Image (tube, rainbow, N blue to C red):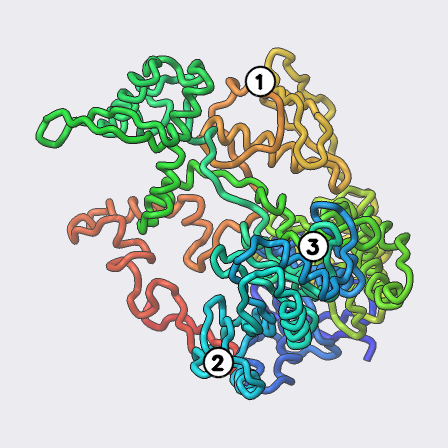
Amino acid sequence: MEWIRIRGARTHNLKNINLDIPRNCLTVITGLSGSGKSSLAFDTLYAEGQRRYVESLSAYARQFLQLMEKPDVDLIEGLSPAISIEQKATSHNPRSTVGTITEIHDYLRLLYARAGTPHCPEHKMPLEAQTVSQMVDHVLALPEGTPLMILAPIINERKGGHEELIVELRAQGFVRMRVNGTICEIDNPPVLAKTSKHSIDLVVDRIKIRPDSRQRLAESFETALSHADGRAIAFEMESGKEHPFSARYACPICGFAVQELEPRLFSFNNPVGACPSCDGLGTHEFFDPVRVVAHPELSLASGAIRGWDRRNQFYFQMLQSLAAFYEFDIDTAFSELPPDICEVVLHGSGTRKIPFKYMSESGRMVNKEHPFEGIIPNLERRYRETDSMAVREELSKYRSERPCPDCGGSRLRREARHVLIGTKSLPEIGALPIGECQSFFSTTRLTGNKAQVAEKVMKEIATRLQFLIDVGLDYLSLNRSADTLSGGEAQRIRLASQIGSGLTGVMYVLDEPSIGLHQRDNERLLGTLRRLRDLGNTVIVVEHDEDAVRMADFVVDMGLGAGEHGGEVIAYGTPAEICANTASITGAFLDGRRSISVPPVRIPPDPSRMLLLTGASGNNLKHVTLELPVGLMTCITGVSGSGKSTLINDTLYAIVARDMHGSSLEPAAYEKVEGLEHFDKVISVDQAPIGRTPRSNPATYTGLLTPIRELFSGVPESRARGYGPGRFSFNVKGGRCEACQGDGMLRVEMHFLPDVFVPCDVC
């Protein structure tokens, strides 16, 4: 069948439309906002395509899938399985990155585990396999008399009860083992939960170090290596320090050893590979002195630090005693105090005891001598010890994020950060722009058996990186957090992943993929859509972009107006046929019969009213100075990744929001800003969805419903009955319909069929 036939489509505002769309072609659905484009593309074609595919699955599988509502349509023929790629942020999970959502990170983990060369963090030398005699020499270098256990790490963070293994070890004559860090006897093992991960180390020998114990140590190490696949641990029983050994990899100078390389060592979502300090998040929250000292221009007594001024008697008495001891004036502006005094106030006096005077509840003066805790340690302790969410929320205002000091923001543990492919480690690859990353994998050549192992994986990585470059995302890096991506970037990443999957015979439905794209990047995107079509797929795009409409094989123009005035097909056919159609508004603009008028006169900027931002250097900005005229409309443009969002959203908006509204946003690096006195408020209108609850509607969001409710509660009949504004709210008891709890719809659970929503028959 060469056509998708739609008959009698009435979804939302569609007016019983009939339409034929060619298969295996690129079709653009255009028209003004609210004319029914999405209703046709997503709520009719995609919903029916998805429903038919899902209904071919078993009833058991269906209950795990979120199904869309069945569209109101008489007939659709010629549909393929449907995939929709919408304009929405991919994930708000802090663990998701560009690398993980494109699955490139999975290939990188495999590559580094199979073909990477581990290096010593201290001496930067490739690690070599250790012999048993080297292990013995290392242990004999410890102080004489040190009690040791020689352990064989058999199970490392693996799920299961491991009963058979324990029985087998007992049969071999072993007496003790260490389970999850606790020593126990093999005859009396703990019960292990099968759903949890466990580590089991076999106790091969217990020994005190003496010069004549070389032979015994050698035999113990050989036993441990044979049981633990070439690995052994010397455990100091008194200090708890562990010395890992490997018959495979170790530093010849300091003996630094790593276990056998495996893919999970390079995953920051797995405890084996994640940095132990930040648990693989790459950031560390801390109480920021800049936020704690909210008003450095004020004195401590006047409220430089909120909660420690004259109004809080207990803490203020503390500061008075501190000022008397260190001889500084509590009425001096905080910014003018000596740095060493600021350090004591914020971080404490260490072990130095200070005489404090407190006023007791009975009004007596009490003298106590103890070290001063410091304001920041005090906040940390209160944050750590409190069970109250309100207190935590309040204290969170003084916290900032910074890269984890241990892993430097790379999220991985030390061993994983020092495995190299060519000259680069995995965190270094993740930090490169995708364009540079692709050229690295295209030019790097490995030797020996590693070349054979890595060939297919490197080819797969380079191909997937090329797809991201083709959709105009060469400026992103693989370690970029997914929650910082715009809706358009997220959509193009999903588009690149689909091309990478190489599916054919599928119907793709896309929602305005060109939004926010520069003309240069738009050409790349359209080339990607053509490639998706050439693989043998039907591509349907909701789009307004002129280039996309002109390039399409088939165009559907919806109209005439929006809402109830729309929902009709005004014109359809090739772009040339649309241009020739006099009824089509899109055709009139394509043909030049109509155009957007350019204002003949523009308002000149006033040089005395300027907003000046100097030295912006966040992300890829190179010390930019920005001068914006006050009271005029300014447009910031440039190719994808040129720094527009960093300059305006991450720097300028964050500065103004922090200075005017006390926002907790941390601006990107800059030197200074001038001209804020011209403004009294800042509002950011971004692409984030406004209502996350089904109870939210345009009237509640804009605040229109409040005066309407007040109007209804003020009429004589309402006043006679004692009705307040709450009586006219569908969100509170007394106003809402109790049958549907104010939803207006009742949900009927259908189990493996999609839930059915019926209008509430009571209200």
Q: Name the residue that disc number 2 marks.
A: 186
Q: Position of residue 511 (x, y in %)?
A: 68, 57
Whether residue 550 is visible:
no
Q: Position of residue 389 (x, y in %)?
A: 34, 49
- Amino acid type shown at disc 2: Ile
Report the side of 306 relative to 541 (left or right).
left
**Residues at marks 1 and 3, CA–CA distance in whole angstroms:** 56 Å
Q: Which mark is residue 255?
A: 3
The answer to whether 92 appears left or right of 340 in the picture is right
Mark 3 or mark 2: whose residue is earlier in sequence: 2
State the mark number for residue 674: 1
| Amino acid on which the number 3 mark rests in the picture | Gly
Instruction: Tell me the kind of residue under disc 1.
Output: Glu
The image quadrant that residue 451 belongs to is bottom right
Task: Give the quadrant of the C terminus.
Answer: bottom left
162 versus 516 height, above or below: below
Helix, strand or loop at mark 2 = loop
Q: Foreground: 490 or 313? A: 313
Circle 1 sits in a helix, a strand or a loop, which is it?
strand
- Foreground label between 2 and 1: 2
Q: Nearer the viewer, mark 1 or mark 3?
A: 3
